Amino acid sequence: MREARLLGTDLRAGLRAGGAPAARRIRRLLRADAVLLADLDGPVARHGTLPAGSDTDALLAEVYEHGTALRRPPLCAAPLIVAGDLSGCLVAAGDLGEEDLGEVARLVAEHLDHAGLRTARVRIAAADLRTLRAQISPHFLHNALAVIAAHIRSDPARARGLLTDFADYLRYSFSTQGDYATVAEELQATQTYLELQRARFDDRLDITVRMAPEILPVAVPFLVVQPIVENAVRHGLERKAGRGHISVSGVGEGPFVVIEVEDDGVGMDPALARAVLAGGGPPARGVGLANVDQRLRAVYGPEHGLLIETAPDSGTKVIIRVPRFMRGVVAE
């Protein structure tokens, strides 16, 4: 059973990346004299020496033509059917039954299916991140530059500081460092954004940031916090009269990191919040929320999307809850 579980680790990145260790492990599982793994382009990996005169090319061609298991002593072959499609073949030599070979072939195909889903999730997340970068609000850019210009004469020192914040904001937002960042980096980008907004609100924006030190090095998808904060400012606080407050907090809860962004703005109907996450909200509202939600689900699985707690005139809280450690999620 342990060998069967570890086979999933071997094939995590696909057949070509993990074929060699997988073939070795499959040989032990089947107690075979030799094992060969192939995809539709031909052999990928083998372990052990196949009997002299074995015509594996002809055997593979026959399996691919008929899509069924075949025995051609001293070889036995079973197709790898991944998500309903023929994707490769498992060939083994030795005294073993077709039923055992077929069971292992199904196990290999299941792991390859999981690997394909993981790859698809990563591609979706990367595409969504590119989309988010392309949607950085012209409204915010215009307002930030207007605020900096307004301070040039009245408060040159603050204008210089805001200009530095603006440059840092653009540098981080368009960074090509990778798909992941640390919580500390996300927090720094968020604080830079909030300082620019505080100046635009004539200091009517109160900000509270509380982040547990132990989660600061944790890697999370790039640009997951700042878009939520931007949504809180634009759709929660801009429409509120008087002072507004926004808090960003994060803690570790066992194997999870929980980050919350809360505002005391105008709030929204819970049904609208659900529509926003589903991508069906008003075009001008919630693009960033839906994007972050999709990327979190793509990276961590469907159970790790955003949670929104809100009601009209009662503010909004958006909660991110993700694993502290996950294979492949590493800040560069």
Image: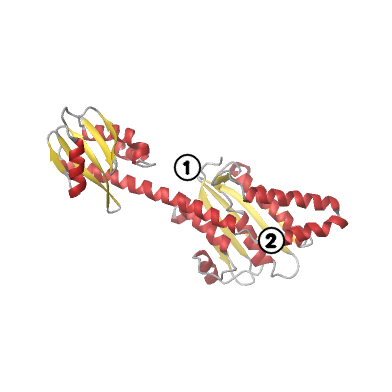
**Residue at disc 2, secondary structure:** helix
Location of mark 2 (residue): 140
Q: Residue at x 64, y 67 (%)?
A: 235
- Residue 34 in the image: state x and y as whole percent: 22, 31
Q: Colour scheme of this structure image?
A: secondary structure
Question: In the figure, is residue 69 to the left or right of 286?
Answer: left
Mark 1 residue crowding within 10 angstroms, few (<14) / some (14–19) / many (20+): few
Mark 2 residue crowding within 10 angstroms, few (<14) / some (14–19) / many (20+): some
- Residue 113 in the image: state x and y as whole percent: 33, 49
Location of mark 1 (residue): 328
Of 290 and 129, nearer the camera is: 129
* Distance between the alpha carbons at the discs numbered 2 and 1: 33 Å
Q: Residue furthest left?
A: 73
Q: Residue at x 70, y 67 (%)?
A: 238
Q: Quadrant of the C terminus?
A: top right
Say which label, 2 or 1, has the lower sequence index. Answer: 2
Question: In the figure, is residue 316 to the left or right of 307?
Answer: right
Q: Residue furthest right?
A: 154
